[in-house]
Amino acid sequence: MKTHNLGAKVWSGVSLFSISFATLVITTGIAPAQTTNTSAPSASSTSNPSNAVATSTQKSAPAKSSSTDLAPNLAPPPAKASPFQFDIGAPLWSSAISGTMGFKGYTAHAYVSFSDLWNHIDYVVPLTMDAHYQKWGFHLDGQYVKLSAPLDPRGVLYKSGDVTMEQAFANFNLNYKVVDTSRFSLNTSIGGRYNYLNLGGTLQGRYIQGDHHFHKGYQVPDQSADGNVEWVDPILGVTASVQICKPVSLQFLADVGGFGVGSHITYQFFAGPQVQIARNFYGNVGFRYLYTNYSEGGNVYNVDMSGPQMTFGVNF
């Protein structure tokens, strides 16, 4: 009787363990480990061992993702154009001078061609410069020139002489681009024009021999004189550019000023083509005219300058 009860309890425990194990397998999806028969391998695994290797490789090898998806993007970002632009050049202006100049009440009218001026130029320093930021810009251009020429006094007191002239002007303005298209641009500007003029001369005196009136000779003393004047004019102006083709454009400039502040009136204009010779080199040629009417304290400068102008420069 005791043996029967013990067998019933053991069988009941085994049944309960089997039911619990089956329930665990069904809910978790874990398959029980398969026992391998080391003593008698199957015919299929023996005849084709590569199947087992392939199956093992397929199970253990991780899934390969596309190399295109995982490769980093190594292409550099596109370069951004700088909002700043600079132009520096040397304008060579072959100008003639015509008008009236005078100092301290002494005036003279003259017309001097550029070929005549060329023979008397000691040196000249030209410059043009532009700086742009988006639609805003600053412009500076001008030149300094020194001239000298001999004098023939045509008298008995002085044997020789010379005259020198220094002239300088500089235009400066702040400008804004009011129209900006692929073929046409228009800038307005406000600024000034600085003017400087210096005129000087010397006369070398003769030695006058003595005669029956003058027992001793007489040395005429040398004479020299110079004077300078400078002033600044307010200036209003416009510049325009018309694109003809990719490297060629037409440039226009016009301004007016003075208004009685410095000069009574002054104005200038320029027109001509510009060529982008290379990526960072440009050149232009055209006709330039500048007129100034100034008078103050006996000093007079009523002069126009005109002639062809050629400029070569760099931009970056």
Image (cartoon, rainbow, N blue to C red):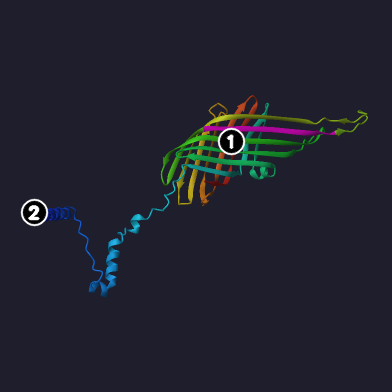
The secondary structure making up most of the magenta span is strand
Label 1 vs label 2: CA separation? 130 Å
Residue drawn where x is 35% and y is 58% of the image: 67
Q: Which mark is residue 170?
A: 1
Where is residue 33 drawn, in percent x and y?
22, 60
Work out which residue is located at the far top of the displayed protein and give it: 297
Q: Amino acid at mark 1?
A: Ala
| Viewer-closest of 64 and 120 | 64
Q: With respect to residue 236, does 127 lie above or below?
A: below
Q: Secondary structure at mark 2?
A: helix
Residue drawn where x is 50% and y is 43% of the image: 85
Q: Secondary structure at mark 1?
A: strand
- Check residue 6 for magenta coloring: no
Work out which residue is located at the far left of the displayed protein and give it: 1
The magenta stretch is 191-206
* Left or right of residue 277: residue 100: right
Pointer 1 or 2: first along the chain: 2
Give the quadrant of residue 260. top right
Q: Which mark is residue 2?
A: 2
Q: With respect to residue 309, does 295 lie above or below?
A: above
Q: Amino acid at mark 2?
A: Lys
Q: Nearer the viewer, mark 1 or mark 2?
A: 2
* Left or right of residue 35: residue 178: right
| Viewer-closest of 236 and 289 | 236
